[in-house]
Amino acid sequence: MNIQVVARVPLLSVVQELVELRLGRVLGRLGQRVEQAAVTFEDQSGPRGGADILCRIWLRLHPRGEINVSAVAASPGAALNEAAQRAGRCAETSVRRSWTERRRSA
């Protein structure tokens, strides 16, 4: 799985490792079905201040398309955890649907 991290807020270098570890753990069962992943961190509150970090995760699945999820939290780690759990649930549902459709058409 190819993971790209884009940060539009100042992040620690540990965040890249955290992204790979967390997505690997959540999406590990899907293995080769996840072709690409992109994780973006943005400051939701902008120049006004505040601690709202938006984490977006985009996944490209084989053969069933794309998944986009997002989560907002006070820290990048918390936002990543929530978004990764959502991405894992959506990806498993998508793969399950694909498998069911193939069985029905056979």
Image (cartoon, rainbow, N blue to C red):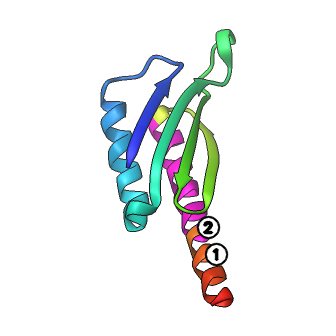
Q: Secondary structure at mark 2?
A: helix
Residue 90 in picture, x, y percent from top left: 61, 61
Distance from Cα at disc 2 to Cα at disc 1: 5 Å
| Residue 52 image point, x, y percent | 62, 28
Q: Amino acid at mark 1?
A: Arg
The image quarter in which residue 43 lies: top right
Residue highlighted by disc 1: 97
- Residue type at numbered disc 2: Ser
Label 1 residue SS: helix
Residue in the picture at 35% in, 44% down: 20
Query: Magenta residues: mostly which secondary structure?
Result: helix
Q: Residue at x 57, y 79 (%)?
A: 99
Direction from residue 47 to residue 92 in the image, left or right = left
Label 2 Cα crowd, 10 Å radius (few <14 / some 14-19 / many 20+):
some
- Give coordinates of residue 49: x percent, y percent: 63, 14
Q: Is residue 41 left or right of residue 16?
A: right
Quadrant of residue 70 in the image?
A: top right
Mark 1 crowdedness (10 Å alpha carbons): few <14, some 14-19, many ≥20: few
**Residue that carries the numbered disc 2 in the rendered image:** 94
- Residue found 68% across the figure and 20% down from its top: 45
Q: Which residues are magenta?
A: 77-94
> Outermost residue, top direction?
47
Q: How many marks?
A: 2
Image side of residue 5 versus residue 73, left or right = left
**Magenta stretch containing residue 29, yes or no?**
no
Please state the horizontal and vertical placement of residue 59, each as a whole percent of the image: 54, 49
User: Badges 2 and 1: C-beta atoms under 8 Å apart?
Assistant: yes
Q: Is residue 59 above or below residue 4?
A: below
Identify whether 92 is placed above or below 16. below
- Magenta stretch containing residue 89, yes or no? yes
Decide: is 83 above or below 63: above
